[in-house]
Image (spheres, rainbow, N blue to C red):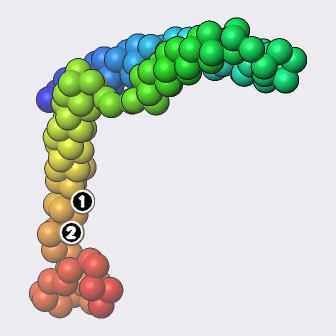
Amino acid sequence: MRSISLLRIAAEAEQLRLHAFMARQGRRAVFAAIAAVFGMAVLALGEVVGWQALRLKVEPIPATLIVLGINLVIAAVFGVLAARSVPSNTEQEAMRVRHQALQAARGTLAFSAAIPVASRLLRLRRPGNGSRMARLPFLGR
């Protein structure tokens, strides 16, 4: 019975870990989408800057470069936020609980499975030739 409750605890911990993992991945996806939008703006403004530099070579260029720099900084900030993927305390704790519960369940199941095997191995059988000497079944003699 204990192993069933331990397996239930492990399943609940895994469910909690997966929920936290999916929330973290969702946040990463939002930050990546924002970074992609600003990255495309940087590329578009880079094209505009190149065109203006070649076409005009006058005063609107510094203003466009400032806007380009601001978009680049915003894209870098959101890119770093999207790349940062540290498991939360909830995920780490859920993983630790799951691991402990599975280890305990394995130990309980291994012990309960080992009892019949051990009793079979320890049971002595009499040889068929009528002698009174007992032999162990796994020795093969």
Badge 2 element: helix
Q: CA distance from mark 2 to mark 1?
A: 6 Å
* Residue 106 placement (x, y as % from top left): 24, 44
Which kind of residue does numbered mark 1 sit on? Answer: Val
* Residue 122 placement (x, y as % from top left): 14, 69
Residue 89 visible, this orientation: yes
Residue farthest toward the right in the current orientation of the protein: 55
Give the mark count: 2
Q: Given contact means CB atoms under 8 Å apart, are the residues at marks 2 and 1 in contact?
A: yes
Front residue of 70/101: it is: 70
Q: Quadrant of the N terminus?
A: top left
Badge 1 element: helix
Which kind of residue does numbered mark 2 sit on? Answer: Leu
Residue at 32% across, 23% down: 17
Front residue of 56/120: it is: 56
Residue 38 visible, this orientation: no
| Residue 81 horizontal side relative to residue 91, left or right | right
Residue of label 1: 117
Q: Quadrant of the C terminus?
A: bottom left
Decide: few, some or many residues near mark 1? Use Cα within 10 Å; few <14, some 14-19, many ≥20: few
Front residue of 16/20: it is: 20
* Residue 95 placement (x, y as % from top left): 26, 32
Residue at 62% across, 10% down: 63
Residue at 70% across, 9% down: 60
Residue at 50% across, 24% down: 76
| Residue 47 horizontal side relative to residue 41, left or right | right
| Residue 84 horizontal side relative to residue 56, left or right | left
* Residue 30 placement (x, y as % from top left): 52, 11
Residue of label 2: 121
Q: What mark, if any, has residue 140 been given in the picture?
A: none
Front residue of 34/104: it is: 34
